[in-house]
Image (cartoon, helix red, strand yellow):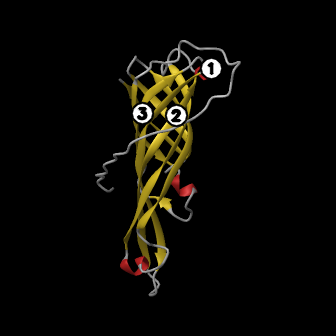
Amino acid sequence: MRILNCAIVCLCISCISAHSQNIPFNKNSPAEKLGRFIISPATGMGAFLFYYPWHNYTPTYNFSFERIVHESDYNDFGIGFAGGYRSLRIERKTTDGSLKDAYRLTYGAGIRGSMYPRAWGGKNYDVYLAGTAGFSYNQFTGDQHLLKSSDFKTGTGFYGAAVVGTHYYFTKSLGVFGEAGFDLDWVKAGLTFKL
């Protein structure tokens, strides 16, 4: 396992508009409180599904931070930032026929916007849609003979995510959450703290 030392700093802005006029207002939504901060560290898997024949070398590590900045009768909106780290491994033959490993390390960070439909929430839980846009940095390490290939070029790129998720709160401030969708991984889960 590799020791992770990843710092993620990003400003956030987002616009998501709501359509539904006939959705009933749900006063019990825990994300309803204007000005609340939601902090969610997580770990996930499934990145290899995007990058076959690469395989997960470690679980992904993710972090999101957002503030509820607007509430209406039907939806709450949050803005913040999100980021994460992913490590993938591939095994290939070198010119002498031996098998060698190469690793693809990806760091991503970007602005995140979330929408919490009140009709989907309850007393202790909420459901939300979220999107992130930002930059990623890909670094390749491993056998030097493999790294000479054009397939292993270190550099920056676009980082984007679109997920659906849910928080479940055990107390007013502590809970768990899960997300699924397009990100550094397919699925992730972790703790969530509401301040």
Residue 10 rendering spot, x and y as whole percentages: 37, 45
Residue 86 rendering spot, x and y as whole percentages: 42, 54
The C terminus sits in image quarter:
top left
**On screen, residue 48 above or below 132:** below
Residue 16 rendering spot, x and y as whole percentages: 57, 35
Looking at the image, which is closer to me, 125 or 26?
26
Q: CA distance from mark 2 to mark 3?
A: 8 Å
Q: Residue 181, located in which quarter of the rendered image?
A: top right
Q: Earlier in the sequence, mark 1 or mark 3?
A: 3
Q: Earlier in the sequence, mark 2 or mark 1?
A: 2
Q: Earlier in the sequence, mark 2 or mark 3?
A: 3
Is residue 180 rendered to the left or right of residue 40?
right
Q: Residue at x 43, y 57 (%)?
A: 136
Residue 157 rendering spot, x and y as whole percentages: 47, 61
Specify the label residue 100 is tagged with: none
For mark 3, what is the residue? 66
Q: Please name the amino acid that badge 2 sits on.
A: Ser
Q: Residue at x 48, y 22 (%)?
A: 31
For mark 1, what is the residue? 119
Specify the label residue 114 is tagged with: 2
Element at badge 2? Answer: strand
Looking at the image, which is closer to me, 9 or 93?
9
Label 3 crowd (10 A; few <14 / some 14-19 / many >=20): many
**On screen, residue 154 above or below 177:** below
